[in-house]
Amino acid sequence: MSDLEIQAGLAGAAARRQTGRGLGTRFGTRFGGRVGLTEVLAAGFVLFLLLAAFAPGLVAPGDPLAIDPRAAFQPPSSAHSFGTDESGRDVYTRVSHGTGGSLQIGVAATLIGLGLGAVLGIIAGMLGSIVDFTVNRLLEVMFAFPGLLLALLFIMVFGPGPATATLAVGLATAPGYARIIRAQLVSVRSSAFVEAATVLGRSRTRILVRHILPNTLAPLLVLGTLGIGQAIIWAAALSYLGLGAKPPAAEWGAMLSAGRTYLNTAVWMSFFPGLFVVLTAISATVLGRAIERRLRHA
Amino acid sequence: MPPLVHHSRVPRSLVAVATLALLLTGCSASPQATESTAPVSGGTLNYASGDAEPTCLDPHVGGNYPQALVGTQFLESLVSRDSAGTIIPWLASSWSQSADGLAWDFTLRENVTFTDGTPFDAAAVQANIAHVQDPKTGSSTGYLAVRKVVSTSVVSPTVVRLTLSEPDSALLESLSQPWLAMESPTALARSQDENCAAPVGTGPFTVASWVKQDAITLVRNDAYTSPPADAAHTGPAYLDSIVWRFIPDSASRYAALQSGAVDVIDNAQPDTIVQAGKSSTIRHLDAPRPGASNRIELNSGRAPFNDPLVREAFVRASDVDSAVASLFQGTATRSFSALSSIEPLGVSRPDLFGYDPEAAATLLDEAGWTGRDSDGYRTKGGVRLSVVFPVSTNQSIPAEQSLFEQLQATAKAVGFDVVLSPLDLSAWYTALGSNSYDAVSAPYTKVGPDVLRTLFDSAGIVPAPSGYFANHAQVNDPEVDAWLTEASQTADAPKRAALYAQAQNRVLEGFYVLPLYDQQNHYLLSSVVSGTRAMPTVSTPTFYDAWLNR
């Protein structure tokens, strides 16, 4: 998701809040706004993911790497709810055990992107003039490359693998965050309450620490939650291209890639890992929006 | 040749396949089918290759399978091979060798001209051998095949003599390969770039254009007169033209065939072959490549596979049969030989390669790998029993990569830690060149059993100046060397067969290789195409006899 999309999303969420319209059926009006059905479902799915990530054995007790050639290419059934792959491995077990790796990459990459973006954005917004100009031009150069291309370039230089894929996705998302944070910082800096603080004779440091930074960085939580979904998609894309996790590791992108060969005959091999990528991204986005709404209410 | 790309299988008997083709089209319910027994001229055949697009269409340069595939349509060799493995005339009508085996005279077919008008004669053959042997050409496959040729001379315009440094029982087999096809000396005199873009041969088609990353267009050579001795007709080809495209994705390639956008695809994968089997409008041509079988080579040059017990244990711990059955779904047959099933001199030893995890465990105990680490892998002196296995993603099809994963799982049960690392071609070559591997699977296509010398002679352990070497198992056995050298020099056919059998048995019994199946090479053809066969040389399809009944 580009920063523009995120900004548009934030604006859209704000508009929905003002007009009182939103996604899904809503129930409950307390606790800082209403809780939508979609939000409940998203939270439920995220809980399942967290369980799968931290205790995969509870969710799927089998071995994700155990082969059974005689049971290859079996469609979803009561024995194998998501079917089996070309080596007879259980797709449900693999998808569940793959959650940890995929979430880890998504969260780590988002933290890297946000951290780097925050540093760049704050430097540009606070120091102004030449520094702002330089950082902005640098960001524009980085924006000239699509994020995934930037990630590919990084992997070309530093070699494939889960660690470099995480770093690559983090770096590729940083410019978007930097620009949003800078814009937020500039608008906060020229807001009435900062002007008031200045008029009241508060020191620059105090204004920065007490007024500007808290108001600038608050949206980071929202951005981060929204970003995790995107980072997981990108990490899966890199694995799909063979640049992330290595087969036979149970990783969603790698499973999608392996299933692609059998798309005509064993669609479940790619459908379920793909579904998990999509549902994770959607859940993260829905939760991000919900958090953002509640923050605004607060 | 060390093929650059995907490989995938071949014609047991080309005659049988051609007959089957005729029967199939004859039996089809479509109205045109009944008329299709008589070839029709005209039309454009669309071909989609899953191999990499060549960087140069001249197979003298480098020399890989994608070049051979398209080159077969416009270039011809001095000799060919029939489905029984016998060398038959093509551009050379006859040949003879001196008593000492050091001089070979080839009598050339008369009245043959290259498509640029240059006559095909003894001087042209001389120019071609010189071109392949010229270091500036950068030939690797062709160069190795004529390594023993020290000079060529024009005896008469229609007789050329090759003088050898030592007798070469594989010379005719070598010359039958597309990597030693005859090109116009006038065309060869151009710059390499020009010649790469449109090589000029004597074949039934000529290269009209090549739009890179799109298509190569081949048009009929109306003056064609030189089909090989086993062709179904004489005179020009039936097709007006061939459009040769590249569709790397297997599913897209098959979809293009189903929709009729293309008429023939290569590198058909097991699942699409099974699907095609249910279709009444798609025909399957199974044409295993000659030379080596697809096998896993175990590096005897370093631990742990320098110990024959550990090699045997790995072989016993690998459940190849179940893997082939589940992944290839009946499209590949298990091999127990170092050579392709189409090589008449191949030795097959099913007795050596059975799956027996208990025997594997006993062998490992015997070899001293008795410890176990926390992950369950065996250890010896604190060192884990690991097998580094670089996998070339360019050369191993997805089903084969999955097969390696299954072997990894079955070997793990016995205590082997098989470390699979999927690599692109250059990283893979680097891993091999730096001896950082314990197991590897590298296809090698060559006509005839002399490929054994390339694969198992100790000279093949030392990388060539290009960095490539083919003895990946690092077999270093003076007796094997002596047998293979003698086999390559003897003109006595039974003796040659016996020597090759001796060498193969030694290699198989030493568990240097784990044979899997033939080099897979499957073509799927729309039922509108008739008369296509794979050449019995390197199993590339030829469209000289092909016609369309759309």
Image: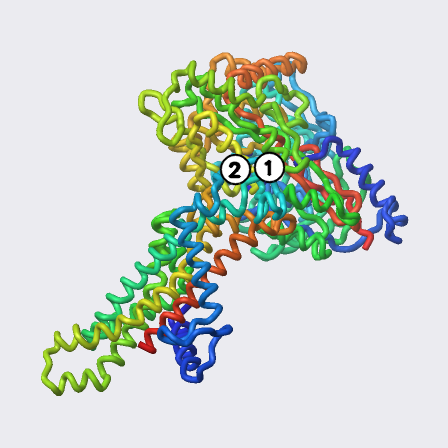
Mark 2 lies on a secondary structure that is: loop
Subunit of label 1: B
At 65% from the left and 36% from the top, the residue drawn is: B9
Disc on res. B351: none
Q: Nearer the viewer, residue B288 or B398?
A: B398
Disc on res. B179: 1
Q: Position of residue A15 (x, y in %)?
A: 42, 82
Quadrant where the C terminus of chain A sits is bottom left
Q: Position of residue B274 (x, y in %)?
A: 70, 43
The kind of residue tagged 2 is Ser
Quadrant location of residue B523?
A: top right
For label 2, the residue is B139
Please determine whether, in this image, residue B412 is positioned above or below residue A77.
Answer: above
Please determine whether, in this image, residue A145 is positioned above or below residue B113.
Answer: below
- Classify 10 Å Cα crowding around label 2: few (below 14), some (14-19), many (20 and above): many
Q: Is residue B222 left or right of residue A14?
A: right
Asked if one can make out residue B130 in the rendered structure from this viewpoint, the answer is: no
At 32% from the left and 21% from the top, the residue drawn is: B381
Q: Is residue B488 left or right of residue B388?
A: right
Q: Nearer the viewer, residue B128 or A7?
A: A7
Asked if one can make out residue B197 in the rendered structure from this viewpoint, the answer is: yes
The kind of residue tagged 1 is Trp
Label 1 with label 2: CB-CB less than 8 Å: yes
At 72% from the left and 46% from the top, the residue drawn is: B276
Subunit of label 2: B
Alpha-carbon span between mark 1 and mark 2? 9 Å
